[in-house]
Amino acid sequence: MKKLYINTGGFDAVFNDLKDSFSGELTADHNDYNLQIKSKWTKGSIKGTRFDDQILFMHFDLIFHQDVSLSIESFQSAPVFFVYCESGNITHTFGANSEKKNLKKSQTAILSNSSVINSVLYFESHKRIQFTLLGMPTIPHIKNKDEELSSLVKKRFTNDTGNYIYVGKENTKIAEKLQEFKAVPQKGTVTNLVKKSILKDILHLEIAHHSYNYLSTFDPVVAIAHKKIAEIKKLRDLNFSEILTNMVLASRNYLPKVSKLKYHFPFKPYQKLAS
């Protein structure tokens, strides 16, 4: 297994470490980074964008020719990372000996690490791995209008131990937002504003998704639905001709009594009058 290490710092430092670790060719245009990799042991690309409020977006598309572990130091800004797997498998541990968490296609992982223990990612050889990473710092270096959003992310996706990880199914609304992000043109000031707005929408969706127990919310609805279905089944199984016959028979027995007691005249069935 090939072992790699990333000493974290600013976004520039991270990409320069990735360039050195993967022996790739790095190009940068303002806050956009593109690392193209082609070596004996791996090929593919790592692309990333840093926005002015320190929100990070990265996309990995790699094939390794041998098993690889990537050990990453905790960031000073203590970001929460949202990982969306599109292809392949990723295994994560805090340090070398902790519990392993596996992330597969169409799954999401949420990760934060402010401890002195490194996060370690494991990649299998000869399998294409594609995943998107969205990072939100919880200790921003600058004051900005998104401090409230940063605070909400920190409150929901960090804990006292400094290590937090969640793995679950893909959220379809977030998947749609990611496709919307990728469809935005690459250049221009307006482009950055649109992209940042989409990423903030994703963060709000993640907070909402993990703040409410949707299963509990739907339980009463499901119960009502089952009750209605049972009632429909009962109606479906009834013999309506039999019901009508019983109603007629009941009325023939009941109406004569009512007419005699209330109106003081005898009631004769229709059939006898017709005769």
Image (tube, rainbow, N blue to C red):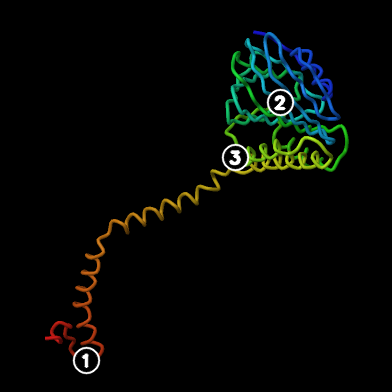
The residue positioned 83% from the left and 38% from the top of the image is 188
Badge 2: how crowded within 10 Å, few (<14), some, or many (20+)? Answer: few
Q: In the rendered structure, which disc, 2 or 3, sits on the residue that comes first in sequence?
A: 2
Q: Residue at x 73, y 18 (%)?
A: 118
Residue 161 image label? 2
Label 3: how many residues lie within 10 Å, few (<14), some (14-19) or many (20+)?
Answer: few
The residue located at (20%, 91%) in the rendering is 265
Question: Which of labels 3 and 1 is toward the front?
Answer: 3
Using the image as rendered, state which of residue 117 and residue 103 is in the foreground. 103
- Which type of secondary structure does the marked residue at label 3 adopt? helix
Place residue 70 in its image quadrant: top right
SS for callout 2: loop
Q: Earlier in the sequence, mark 1 or mark 2?
A: 2
Q: Is residue 24 above or below residue 175?
A: above
Rounded to the nearest whole Å, what is the CA distance between mark 1 and mark 2? 89 Å
Residue at the spot of label 3: 172
Percent x, y of residue 239: 25, 61
Quadrant, the N terminus: top right
Please give the residue where the numbered disc 1 appears in the rendered image: 264
Instruction: Looking at the picture, tell me which residue is in the foreground, 205 or 147.
Output: 205
Q: Is residue 240 left or right of residue 96?
A: left
Q: Is residue 168 left or right of residue 75?
A: left
Label 1, secondary structure: give it.
loop
Q: Quadrant of residue 129?
A: top right
Where, by quadrant of the figure, is residue 123 drawn? top right
Q: Residues within 10 Å of mark 1 (few under 14, many from 20)?
A: few
